[in-house]
């Protein structure tokens, strides 16, 4: 249980983390997720409903500062996901979900009540310059002050933060090169590898990293309300989660 | 040891970087028609459009202006539209939040740059997106005349993939 290096300490001091009567939790606002008992009993490597958001302090190069994942406790709800910018699979959808929440927050006037964090696990490629270009391409409003692109300082630190602290597993594939660019803008030759290759025939391009998506929603008290693993949540799912937290 | 388990979990999906699209997408079932706002762009008039429309086969391409793969796929969609545009109703749909960093004019520019020639629409309330369980782009859905899902799949699609799905929908 490597994540307990961070979360376990907090759990021990704050207590009250198990499911209470009726399946609710005194630290959470949302109802337990449908599969809560399975999630709780599965001893997943990432934090689930009712557990504290783990702590890691990570550099935010575009803001020339460092950010602790728990520095927003008492102030903002936190949405946190893990990406690499040259990903042409699921990751841009995860970032896009954060952008959707940023837009919803602007429309509903709660920009300052959320912190939107995307952590890269490809720090060699994802330099400050690359992250800036990514932010602009993805439609992130960098002036809103609630979006943080975080870059662990080096591959070792990335492994510590992304995998050990947050339980988001990833692995380099044989296609990994420190600076290799996927040619997804040049005629689509990443193509549909159906019938062969590591794409598995589901239309996914080959990528420098293998990973499963992880998208966390934590309330302003620092407790996880939703952890979407295995599959990316739809944008509306995430927006509804955050709206419910804000309206509570 | 934990790391090994994590990696085993990742690889257990059987697809590198993939698998993720599969879980939320509806692969069977019938989709209720919804009204989407259409965007003024080449081949597309501002207004509304019912998607999917009963009585006709629908080809729905979800995209976003930031999506490189979506842009790279456009020649394939265009070729399919030229081949079978009279047999099926083509519509490209974005569910990006428009009016913030990205505007309708940006979508129209993207459309023009990628030589789109059919209707492009905005699912501002995620109605169609949710009905099909779409969590990423590109996603391609093909529905038959009864609005039953024939195809609902992520990733790059070729001209022949569209044609085959439409043939299946018409069978």
Image (cartoon, rainbow, N blue to C red):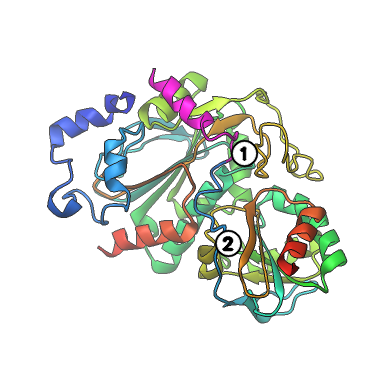
Mark 2 highlights which residue? B96
- Report the residue at 50% width, 70% height from top: B125
- Report the residue at 54% width, 55% height from top: B25
Asked where in the image residue A195 lies, by quadrant, the reply is: top right
Is residue A151 shown to the viewer in this render?
yes
In the figure, A146 relative to A246: above or below? above
> How many labels sit on residues?
2
Residue B57 placement (x, y as % from top left): 71, 72
Is the residue under label 2 in contact with that under label 1 (CB below 8 Å)?
A: no
A15 vs B9, nearest the viewer? B9
Magenta segment: does it hold A169?
A: no
Residue A56 placement (x, y as % from top left): 35, 31
Mark 2 element type: loop
Chain for disc number 2: B
Q: Is the residue marked by circle 2 packed among few (<14), some (14-19), or many (20+) residues within 10 Å? A: many
| Label annotation for residue A87 | 1
A210 vs B145, nearest the viewer? B145
- Report the residue at 66% width, 71% height from top: B121
């Amino acid at each position: 249980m490597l994540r307990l290096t961070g979360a376990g300490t907090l759990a021990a001091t704050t207590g009250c983390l198990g499911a209470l009567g009726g399946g609710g939790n005194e630290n959470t606002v949302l109802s337990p997720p449908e599969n809560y008992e399975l999630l709780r009993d599965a001893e997943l490597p990432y934090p689930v409903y009712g557990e504290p958001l783990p702590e890691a302090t990570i550099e935010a190069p575009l803001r020339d500062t460092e950010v602790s994942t728990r520095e927003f406790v008492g102030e903002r709800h936190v949405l946190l996901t893990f990406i690499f910018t040259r990903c042409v699979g699921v990751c841009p959808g995860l970032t896009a979900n954060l952008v959707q929440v940023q837009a919803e927050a602007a429309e509903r006037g709660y920009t300052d009540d959320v912190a939107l964090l995307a952590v890269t696990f490809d720090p060699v490629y994802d330099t400050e310059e690359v992250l800036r270009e990514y932010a602009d391409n993805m439609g992130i409003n960098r002036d809103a002050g609630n979006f943080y692109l975080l870059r662990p300082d080096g591959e070792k630190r990335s492994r510590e933060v992304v995998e050990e602290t947050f339980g988001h597993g990833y692995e380099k594939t044989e296609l990994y090169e420190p600076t290799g660019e996927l040619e997804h803008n040049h005629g689509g030759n990443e193509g549909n590898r159906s019938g062969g290759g590591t794409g598995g025939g589901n239309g996914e391009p080959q990528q420098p990293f293998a990973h499963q998506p992880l998208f966390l929603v934590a309330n302003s008290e620092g407790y996880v309300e939703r952890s979407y693993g295995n599959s990316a949540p739809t944008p509306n799912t995430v927006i509804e989660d955050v709206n419910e937290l804000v309206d509570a | 040891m934990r790391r090994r388990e994590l990696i085993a979990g990742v690889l257990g999906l059987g697809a590198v970087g993939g698998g993720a699209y599969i879980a939320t997408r509806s692969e069977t079932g019938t989709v209720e028609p919804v009204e989407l706002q259409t965007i003024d762009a080449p081949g597309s008039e501002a207004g509304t459009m019912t998607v999917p429309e009963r009585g006709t086969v629908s080809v729905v391409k979800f995209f976003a202006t930031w999506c490189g793969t979506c842009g790279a796929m456009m020649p394939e969609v265009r070729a399919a539209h030229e081949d079978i545009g009279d047999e099926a109703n083509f519509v490209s749909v974005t569910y990006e939040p428009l009016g913030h960093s990205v505007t309708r004019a940006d979508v129209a520019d993207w459309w023009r740059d990628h030589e789109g020639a059919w209707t492009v629409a905005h699912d501002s309330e995620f109605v169609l997106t949710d009905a099909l369980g779409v969590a990423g782009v590109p996603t391609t859905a093909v529905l038959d005349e009864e609005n039953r899902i024939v195809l609902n799949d992520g990733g790059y699609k070729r001209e022949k993939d569209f044609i085959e799905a439409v043939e299946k929908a018409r069978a």
